[in-house]
Amino acid sequence: MMEHLYIKSDKKRGVEATFKWLNDELQELKEALNNKDKTALEKEFADVLAWLASLANITEVNLEKAALEKYQYKCPKCQQAPCTCKFIKVKSDVSAQHL
Ligand SMILES: [Zn+2]
């Protein structure tokens, strides 16, 4: 869908500027998460997904295929569904990494 809507303008903008837009939208998502505003959250999740899809399109990555190949029905680390990995907190209370 995003490719159909925006591929010409996305290609013209380029990878670096599109990544900047994605990063800006992630910051707006963070603000919506902090404000616990459901309507704003829905809008910001949609914006992040749209810019991620645009970045995938201009780098000729099939986002859906890549996600399905890596995460299809099981965790890529522990190979279980649901995931059985143990997570630890790092740096802030919103970051985590696999042990
Ligand atoms: Zn796992």
Image: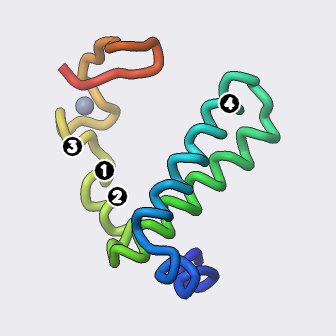
Kind of residue at badge 3: Pro
Q: Real-space Cα distance between discs 3 and 1?
A: 6 Å
Q: CA distance from mark 3 to mark 2?
A: 11 Å
Gap between marks 2 and 1 measured at Cα: 6 Å
| Res 76 quadrant in image | top left
x%, y% of residue 22?
A: 52, 53
The label shown at residue 71 is 1
Three-letter code, disc 4? Glu
Q: Quadrant of residue 29?
A: top right
Sooner in the amino-acid sequence: mark 4 or mark 2: 4
- Residue at image location 65% in from the left, 54% down from the top: 46
Label 3 sits on residue:
76
Which residue does the image show at 18% across and 19% down from the upper left?
A: 99
Q: Are marks 2 and 1 in contact (CB under 8 Å)?
A: yes
Disc 4 or 3, which lies upstream in sequence? 4
Q: For mark 3, give the secondary structure.
A: loop
Mark 3 Cα shell of 10 Å, populated few (<14), some (14-19), many (≥20) = few
